Amino acid sequence: MIWARRGVGATLCPKSQITGDSAAWLELYHVWKRLGFPETRTLSAREAHAMLILEQESEADRERN
């Protein structure tokens, strides 16, 4: 077993699907969580959608724990 979490596991290393954009969104989200969320009007639609998805996943993860 290479990776396991909440009853799901992998025996092979999966190919990374993280792109330059997704890495940047993860970094931006982390900064926002540490410093507070800025005006969303300054974001592009893609950035706003990425932040929404990351916040929803973060909330779902907190609820599971």
Image: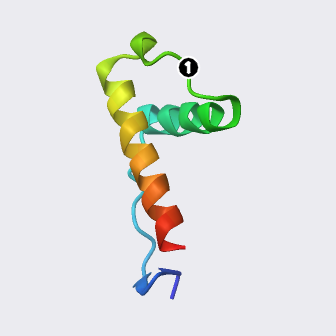
Left or right, residue 32 beside residue 49? right
Residue 44 drawn above or below residue 35 = above
- Dot 1 corresponds to which residue? 38
Name the colour scheme.
rainbow
Question: Which residue sits at x=48%, y=67%?
Answer: 63
Q: Position of residue 52 (x, y in %)?
A: 38, 38
Characterize the local packing of mark 1: few (<14), some (14-19) or many (20 or more) Cα atoms within 10 angstroms: few
Question: Which residue sits at x=53%, y=81%?
Answer: 2
Question: Which residue sits at x=56%, y=30%?
Answer: 28
- The residue sitting at the right extreme is 34
Q: Where is residue 17 in the image (x, y as percent from the top left)?
A: 38, 51
Question: If the image is split into quadrants, where does the C terminus sit?
Answer: bottom right
Left or right, residue 46 beside residue 9? left
Residue 10 drawn above or below residue 52 = below
- The residue sitting at the top extreme is 42
The amino acid type found where label 1 is placed reads Pro
Viewer-side residue, 58 vs 2: 58
Q: Where is residue 29 in the image (x, y as percent from the top left)?
A: 54, 36
Viewer-side residue, 39 vs 21: 39
Question: Which residue sits at x=40%, y=12%?
Answer: 41
Q: How many marks?
A: 1
- The secondary structure type at the circle numbered 1 is loop
Residue 3 drawn above or below residue 55 = below
Q: Quadrant for residue 37, please give it.
A: top right
